[in-house]
Amino acid sequence: MTYPPPPPDQSGQGGFQYDPYGSQPGSQPQNPSQPQQPGYGPAPQQPGYGPAPQLPPQAPGYPPAYGAPGYGPQLPKGMAIGSMVTGIISVAGLCIPYINFASLILGIIAAILGGVALKKINRGEAAGKGQAITGLVLGIIVCALAAIGIIMFFAVGATMLGTGAATTSY
């Protein structure tokens, strides 16, 4: 594909000057001997914005007013995250044979951390309610399943020992 030759230089500067807008008014450089057209000068300076408006003080006994998200002190949520992570690890531990006891311990830790985090969240001292609830629920479920698994392990073991002793009589 061939392109048409560039238009001849009309700027008087003696070289090719690319003008993507063709010969529209205002696209060619201004000659200093010609008077400048009104409206093409520098833009007038706009006044700057002042500080953000402050909210009125909160009345006692009412919930906090809505504000812009992300402002104000950020509450810690380390216990809630710890509860959720411990609960997830304990669920993964249930899938591995012979690790039920370790999963039971991790489930107990997840449930305790989730309960303590929920108390702090309800008092307004922390954040991460969804993570705390997730850790608490996972911890309780893992504790129940691990306890059932451990009981079944010992019941099957005792049954096997009992039947093995009864079948070896001479």
Image (tube, rainbow, N blue to C red):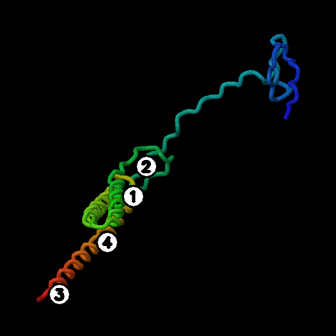
CA–CA distance in space, label 4 to label 1:
21 Å
Q: Earlier in the sequence, mark 1 or mark 2?
A: 2
Q: Residue at x 47, y 51 (%)?
A: 65
- Residue annotated with mark 1: 131
State whether residue 118 appears in this view: no
Q: Is residue 46 left or right of residue 78?
A: right
- Residue annotated with mark 2: 58
- Residue annotated with mark 3: 167
CA–CA distance in space, label 2 to label 4:
48 Å
Res 81 → quadrant: bottom left
- Residue annotated with mark 4: 145
Within 10 angstroms of label 3, few (less than 14), some, or many (20 or more) residues? few
User: What kind of residue is marked 4?
Assistant: Leu
Looking at the rendered image, the disc whose residue lies closer to the viewer, 2 or 4, is 4
154 versus 116 height, above or below: below
- CB contact under 8 Å: marks 1 and 2: no
CA–CA distance in space, label 3 to label 4:
33 Å
CA–CA distance in space, label 3 to label 2:
80 Å
Q: Which of marks 4 and 1 is nearer the N terminus?
A: 1
Picture coordinates of residue 149 (x, y %)?
28, 73
